[in-house]
Image (tube, rainbow, N blue to C red):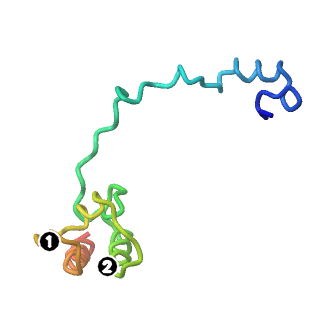
Amino acid sequence: MNYLTSEQNNPVDNLIEIYNSEYCITLDELPDLKSYPMAEETEVIKGDVNLDGTVSAADAVLLGKYLTNQTSLSTRQSEAAMLTDDNEVNVFDMTALKRILLKN
Protein backbone atom coordinates (compact mmCIF):
# COMPACT_ATOMS: atom_id res chain seq x y z
CA MET A 1 0.00 0.00 0.00
CA ASN A 2 1.34 3.40 -0.96
CA TYR A 3 0.88 5.80 1.95
CA LEU A 4 0.86 8.96 -0.16
CA THR A 5 -1.66 7.90 -2.75
CA SER A 6 -3.80 5.61 -0.62
CA GLU A 7 -7.29 7.00 -0.13
CA GLN A 8 -7.34 5.50 3.32
CA ASN A 9 -4.60 7.91 4.45
CA ASN A 10 -5.10 10.80 2.06
CA PRO A 11 -8.43 11.63 0.50
CA VAL A 12 -8.21 12.51 -3.20
CA ASP A 13 -9.37 16.07 -2.56
CA ASN A 14 -6.50 16.54 -0.09
CA LEU A 15 -3.93 15.27 -2.62
CA ILE A 16 -5.31 17.57 -5.33
CA GLU A 17 -5.14 20.54 -2.96
CA ILE A 18 -1.51 19.78 -2.06
CA TYR A 19 -0.51 19.20 -5.69
CA ASN A 20 -2.03 22.52 -6.77
CA SER A 21 -0.57 24.54 -3.88
CA GLU A 22 2.36 26.92 -4.38
CA TYR A 23 4.48 24.72 -2.09
CA CYS A 24 4.43 21.69 -4.39
CA ILE A 25 7.24 21.37 -6.92
CA THR A 26 6.99 18.71 -9.56
CA LEU A 27 10.01 17.07 -11.17
CA ASP A 28 9.47 18.90 -14.45
CA GLU A 29 9.76 22.24 -12.58
CA LEU A 30 13.24 21.49 -11.23
CA PRO A 31 16.16 23.17 -13.00
CA ASP A 32 18.41 21.23 -15.34
CA LEU A 33 21.39 20.68 -13.04
CA LYS A 34 23.74 20.01 -15.96
CA SER A 35 23.32 23.57 -17.21
CA TYR A 36 22.36 25.29 -13.93
CA PRO A 37 24.81 28.09 -13.13
CA MET A 38 26.87 27.20 -10.09
CA ALA A 39 28.42 29.73 -7.74
CA GLU A 40 32.00 30.54 -8.59
CA GLU A 41 34.48 29.22 -6.05
CA THR A 42 36.01 32.12 -4.21
CA GLU A 43 39.72 32.44 -3.66
CA VAL A 44 40.98 30.76 -0.51
CA ILE A 45 42.06 33.18 2.20
CA LYS A 46 45.34 32.03 3.71
CA GLY A 47 44.75 31.19 7.37
CA ASP A 48 40.96 30.85 7.02
CA VAL A 49 41.03 27.12 7.78
CA ASN A 50 37.30 26.82 8.52
CA LEU A 51 36.47 28.77 5.30
CA ASP A 52 34.11 31.22 6.98
CA GLY A 53 35.65 34.26 5.28
CA THR A 54 37.75 35.55 8.19
CA VAL A 55 40.95 34.51 9.93
CA SER A 56 40.20 34.05 13.62
CA ALA A 57 40.95 31.95 16.69
CA ALA A 58 38.44 29.39 15.40
CA ASP A 59 40.84 28.67 12.55
CA ALA A 60 43.65 28.01 15.02
CA VAL A 61 41.40 25.64 16.98
CA LEU A 62 40.51 23.70 13.83
CA LEU A 63 44.14 23.56 12.72
CA GLY A 64 45.13 22.35 16.20
CA LYS A 65 42.53 19.58 16.01
CA TYR A 66 43.89 18.56 12.62
CA LEU A 67 47.48 18.52 13.87
CA THR A 68 46.47 16.28 16.79
CA ASN A 69 44.53 13.90 14.49
CA GLN A 70 41.13 14.83 15.93
CA THR A 71 39.68 15.89 12.57
CA SER A 72 40.48 15.99 8.88
CA LEU A 73 40.62 18.89 6.45
CA SER A 74 39.11 19.21 2.99
CA THR A 75 41.35 20.10 0.06
CA ARG A 76 40.32 23.77 0.27
CA GLN A 77 40.85 23.83 4.04
CA SER A 78 44.32 22.33 3.60
CA GLU A 79 45.09 24.97 1.00
CA ALA A 80 44.03 27.70 3.44
CA ALA A 81 46.06 26.11 6.25
CA MET A 82 49.33 25.96 4.24
CA LEU A 83 50.92 29.21 5.36
CA THR A 84 54.54 28.17 4.86
CA ASP A 85 56.29 27.16 1.66
CA ASP A 86 56.79 23.47 2.49
CA ASN A 87 53.56 22.27 0.76
CA GLU A 88 52.25 20.42 3.81
CA VAL A 89 50.12 21.30 6.79
CA ASN A 90 52.20 21.10 9.95
CA VAL A 91 53.12 22.85 13.19
CA PHE A 92 55.00 25.56 11.25
CA ASP A 93 51.68 26.60 9.73
CA MET A 94 50.19 26.83 13.22
CA THR A 95 53.04 29.14 14.24
CA ALA A 96 52.44 31.31 11.16
CA LEU A 97 48.70 31.41 11.88
CA LYS A 98 49.31 32.49 15.48
CA ARG A 99 51.54 35.32 14.19
CA ILE A 100 48.75 36.45 11.87
CA LEU A 101 46.27 36.41 14.75
CA LEU A 102 48.60 38.41 17.01
CA LYS A 103 48.87 41.12 14.34
CA ASN A 104 45.09 41.49 14.17
Q: Provide residue 27's location: percent of width, then percent of height.
A: 56, 24
Q: Real-space Cα distance between discs 2 and 1?
A: 15 Å
Q: Provide residue 46's location: percent of width, then percent of height.
A: 22, 62
- Closer to the camera, 49 or 55? 49
Between disc 2 and disc 1, the foreground one is 2
Kind of residue at disc 2: Leu
Q: Is residue 98 left or right of residue 10?
A: left
Q: Provide residue 48's location: percent of width, then percent of height.
A: 29, 62
Q: What residue is drawn where x is 83% and y is 18%?
A: 13
Quarter of the C terminus within the rendering = bottom left
- Closer to the camera, 100 or 38? 38
Determine which of the numbered discs, if any, sits on residue 67 in the image.
Answer: 2
The relative height of residue 26 versus residue 90 in the rendered view (above or below) is above
Q: Mark 2 touching mark 1, by CB under 8 A?
A: no
Q: What residue is drawn where x is 70% and y is 21%?
A: 19
Picture quarter containing residue 41? top left
Q: What residue is drawn where x is 37% and y is 28%?
A: 36
Q: Earlier in the sequence, mark 2 or mark 1?
A: 2
Q: Is residue 70 left or right of residue 10?
A: left
Residue that carries the numbered disc 1 in the rendered image? 84
Q: What residue is drawn where x is 28% and y is 39%?
A: 40
Crowd rating for badge 2 (residues with CA inside 10 Å; few <14, some 14–19, many 20+): some
Picture quarter containing residue 80? bottom left
Kind of residue at disc 1: Thr
- Closer to the camera, 19 or 61? 19
